[in-house]
Amino acid sequence: MLIRLRGGRVIDPAHNRDAVDDVFIDDGRIVASPAKGREPDEIYDVRGKIVMAGAIDVHSHIAGYNVTMARLLMPELPALAARKGVPIAPTPAAWSAFATGLRYAEMGYTTVIEPAVIPTHAIEAQRELSRIPIIDVGGLVILGNDDFTLGLLRDGAGANEIEDYVGWTLAHSKCLGIKLINAGGSAAFKFNARTFGLDDEVPAYGVASRTILQGLQRAVTALGVPHPIHVHCNNLGVAGNIDTAVATMEAAEGLPMHLAHIQFYGYGDEGPKGLSSAAPRLAEAIKRHANISVDIGQVLFGQTLTLSADILRQFDGRRAANPHKWEIIQGEGNGTGIVPYKYRAENFVNAMQWAIGLEIMLLADDLWRVLFSTDHPNGALFVRYPEIIHLLMDRDERARLLDRVPLEARELCNLPGIARELTLSEIAIVTRAGPARRLGLADRGHLGAGAIADVAVYTDQADKTAMFRSADLVFKNGRRVVEDGAVVDISWGQAFQVAPGFDTAIERKLARFYDRYYGVTPSSFGVPGTIAARPDRFQTVPCLS
Ligand SMILES: [Zn+2]
């Protein structure tokens, strides 16, 4: 079926395109102008509207064990409650997988990456991901605090063996990439460490955090996994941790690396309260390291819940729990820490966090490497993305909120002096083209011929919150799924994985390890190919050669 979106302002930074034009969709793909004489089956008049590719979220906690534990701890969090009623049964609970797909689609999002799949809980995560409608999904699987990785590094395993283990873990979990969370920190926490830096060693193993970081990064790079190793650095949230972020970039030694929710590492320790904005230094460091990409992890004022496999930092954060309840689970590998949190504009630290995130993005030299995120739900719930886009695009909107924050924060941060307002093209880079490129998903994030027909249409208006909260039209694989901000059709997407392969010798070693410590076989935890409703649900993204 041929669809024509007629006369919209097409914003497609991957092709340097910002012009009034038609977009054609044929059989689920974007096509160039159809052959002469061929009439569209459907025409949508989008004159005066903005047309973009479907948005892509590079880091959002939407499924798996840690999300389940968060739901159990705080079912009252009105995370994803319907804004305007849900037209299609079943009525979603506030936190449900079903609601996740609907709320994302309404905003024009069509692909979302879950960044913290625990290898031994991968089945649960993939099963739940498969129940999120409309959007395509992918998982990043966590390594680096698990005893098998630490054992390999302690025993001086060769690069090949580490690559085999990484390849096996990707196959076992059917994930798109590798996530590293406070490398060695959760393992050290179990030996009662309460701080853990890049050069600290995991007790009993004698392996430094830097060794884990570099060992896994090299394996991911050597295997040609398109998405670089996705790193949650040490010392999250600690004043002065800008040094950790910069040291981590240096430790990458020019190889590709993605640093998650970088706002939480933009902290200097200067000023009367020992907390200052290191956003300028961070922006400069990102500029200097062309191998590094980041996502922001922007904070917004309001109630949310922090959820992280960095149990060492979450244990420290438990004192600030609001409401006062929390859980720390020392699972295999990383475990999970859940701490409800309310960011308040009147709070000096929260105000600084809010300003620092915006500063990093507004000071960015190359937005293709500075991607949009809130680390949902950690910085803010994903349903609040439109408010952040508004702040990035509108200096007056920032001034309005700056009036609410304490004077000392206003004086210490750089935000009041930043005039930059991101353009629609730049928003399309940080929410579409940039994430697609960094994830290695060549068929999306743009509107070139051959791309998947994931398309969002918005009404351009001064109130960017209203604009991006509610897409006029969203097409998923060429199928119209949203109209006037409401889901009108439920489709089911696919999950991405990479499959770099591995030497099967690692399986024998893993079988002995699992048998000795758990009394089960590794296959008990492996994600079967038919976990989802449709057999073609897992799509393998090719590795780089
Ligand atoms: Zn995260």
Image: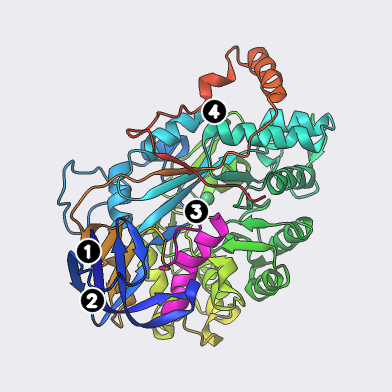
Distance between mark 4 and mark 3 Cα atoms? 20 Å
Q: Which is closer to the viewer, label 2 or label 1?
A: 2
Residue at horizontal 40 percent and vertical 85 percent from the top: 396
Where residue 116 sits: x, y (%)?
Answer: 53, 43
Mark 4 nearby-residue class (10 Å; few <14, some 14–19, many ≥20): many
Secondary structure beneath dot 2 equals loop
Task: Tell me the SS state at disc 4.
Answer: helix
Residue annotated with mark 4: 120
Q: Circle 3 is placed at which residue position?
A: 59
First in sequence: mark 2 or mark 4?
2
Which residue type does callout 1 highlight?
A: Gly
Residue type pointed to by label 4: Thr
Rendering quarter of residue 255: bottom right
**Residue 143 image position (x, y, % from top left):** 64, 38
Residue 351, numbered label: none
Residue that appears at 45% across and 65% down = 432
User: Tag 3 or tag 4, which sits nearer the N-term?
Assistant: 3
Q: Viewer-proximal residue, 64 or 453?
A: 453
Task: Identify the residue position indicated by label 2 in the image.
Answer: 46
Q: Position of residue 336 (x, y in %)?
A: 53, 37
* Residue at the spot 54% in from the left edge and 68% down from the top edge: 357
Residue bearing the label numbered 1: 485
Dominant secondary structure (helix, strand or loop) of the stretch shown in magenta: helix
Q: Is residue 297 visible?
A: no
